[in-house]
Each structure stands twice: as C-alpha cells, then as structure tokens.
Image (cartoon, grey):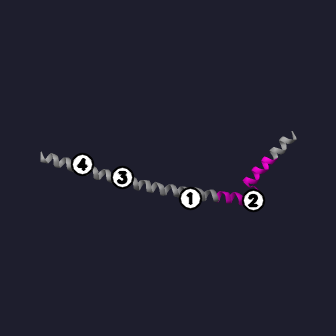
Amino acid sequence: MKLNSLGAASLLALSLVVVSGCDQVEKSAQQVLGKATESAKQAIDETHKAAEQALNEATQGLISPEKNQEQNEKESESGSKEA
C-alpha cells in the first residue's frame, strides 16, 4: 500500500515539474515570437523607407503622392464645375 502511495506522490510531483517546465517553455516562446515580430516590423519599415527613397530618386522628386492626390482632386472639382 505504501508503495502505491509513494508511486502516486512521485507521479504527481513529476507531473507538476513537467507542467511548470511547459509554462517556462511557453513564456520563452512568447518572448522569442515578440522579438521576431519587432524585428519583422523594423525590417518592413526600413524597406518601406528605402522604397520611398528609391522612388523619389527615380522620379527626381517629380511625383509626390500627396501633391498628386491634391492635383487629382482639384482637377475633379474643376471638371465637375465646368460640366
């Protein structure tokens, strides 16, 4: 009878160790994923900036999204007024 109780207690203790180990693994995995996410965001931001700069250099500053959009809006307004 004592052997069964000792075995059950050992099994319970081992289960607790495994569960606490899994929690630590999960926390570590979340930290790694968080760092990977931040690195990916930073890479995307840097790529976006580089692409904007390359586009600006390629067009020699002739095309600006804000100016182009404003010009299209003005043309639309003047076109609808003339009609």
Q: Which mark is residue 23?
A: 3
Marked residue nearer the N-terminal end (2 or 4): 4
Disc 2 to disc 4: CB gap under 8 Å: no
Front tag of 2 and 4 = 4
Marked residue nearer the N-terminal end (4 or 1): 4
**Magenta-colored segment: predominant secondary structure:** helix
Say which quarter of the image contains residue 56: bottom right
Front tag of 1 and 2 = 1
Instruction: Identify the element where label 4 is drawn.
Output: helix
Q: Which residue is mark 4?
A: 12
The quarter in which the C terminus is drawn is top right
Instruction: Please identify the residue farthest to the top as the structure is shown.
Output: 83
What amino acid is labelled 3 in the image? Answer: Asp
Q: Which residue is mark 1?
A: 42
Say which quarter of the image contains residue 67: bottom right
C-alpha span from label 3 to label 2: 54 Å
Q: Residues within 10 Å of mark 2 (few under 14, many from 20)?
A: few
Q: Position of residue 37 (x, y in %)?
A: 51, 55
Residue 56 inside the magenta-drawn segment: yes
What amino acid is labelled 2 in the image? Answer: Gly
What amino acid is labelled 4 in the image? Answer: Leu
C-alpha span from label 4 to label 3: 17 Å
Q: Residues within 10 Å of mark 3 (few under 14, many from 20)?
A: few
C-alpha span from label 2 to label 4: 70 Å
Instruction: Identify the element where label 1 is drawn.
Output: helix
Q: Is residue 34 left or right of residue 74?
A: left
| Residue 44 or residue 69, whichever sits in front | 69
Front tag of 3 and 1 = 3
Marked residue nearer the N-terminal end (3 or 1): 3
Q: Position of residue 14 (x, y in %)?
A: 25, 51
